[in-house]
Image: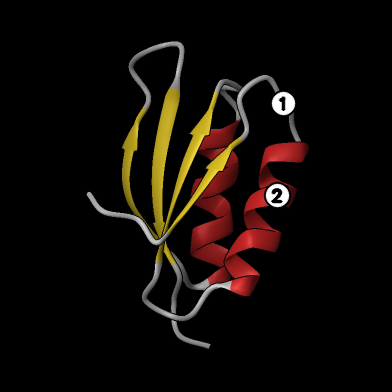
Amino acid sequence: MNAHEELDTQGLKCPEPLMLVRNRVREMAPGEVLYVVATDPTTHRDFTHFCRFMGHDLVEAKTDGPTLEYWIRKGGD
């Protein structure tokens, strides 16, 4: 999947990845996609709740290896 922005949060622990994602998504236009790479297993829960609460879409998540990948589409403002 193509992304408009990329964010590498590998090696960071909760809550840092979520804070970085929140700040980056805030700067993006509605409909744009953010690709995130992470290593903290709690990011899946955090990003799922973040998207649901803020009206964004967790388009895809690959969580079957040591490196986790997420694609988040910003919802309308």
Where 33 sits versus 15, above or below?
below
Residue type, label 1 = Leu
* SS assignment at label 1: loop
* SS assignment at label 2: helix
* Residue 36 x, y percent position in the rendering: 49, 41
Residue toward you, 9 or 52:
9
| Residue at (64, 71) in percent of width and height | 26
Are the residues tagged 1 and 2 within 8 Å (C-beta)? yes
Residue type, label 2 = Leu
Where 45 sits versus 26, above or below?
above
Query: Residue under circle 1?
Result: 12
| Residue at (72, 26) in percent of width and height | 12
Q: Residue furthest left?
A: 1
Judge left or right: residue 74 versus residue 3.
right
Count of numbered labels shown in the rendering: 2
Residue toward you, 7 or 59:
7
Which class describes the residues within 10 Å of circle 1: few (<14), some (14-19), or many (20+)?
few
* Residue 59 x, y percent position in the rendering: 30, 54
Query: Residue under circle 2?
Result: 20
- Separation of disc 1 and disc 2 at Cα? 10 Å
Judge left or right: residue 18 versus residue 34.
right
Q: Quadrant of residue 68?
A: top left
- Give the mark nearer the N terminus: 1 vs 2: 1
Which class describes the residues within 10 Å of circle 2: few (<14), some (14-19), or many (20+)?
some
Q: Residue furthest top?
A: 66
Judge left or right: residue 46 versus residue 64.
right
How is the protein colored in the picture? secondary structure
* Residue 69 x, y percent position in the rendering: 40, 33
| Residue at (60, 43) in percent of width and height | 46
* Residue 2 x, y percent position in the rendering: 26, 54
Residue toward you, 75 or 3:
3
| Residue at (34, 55) in percent of width and height | 3
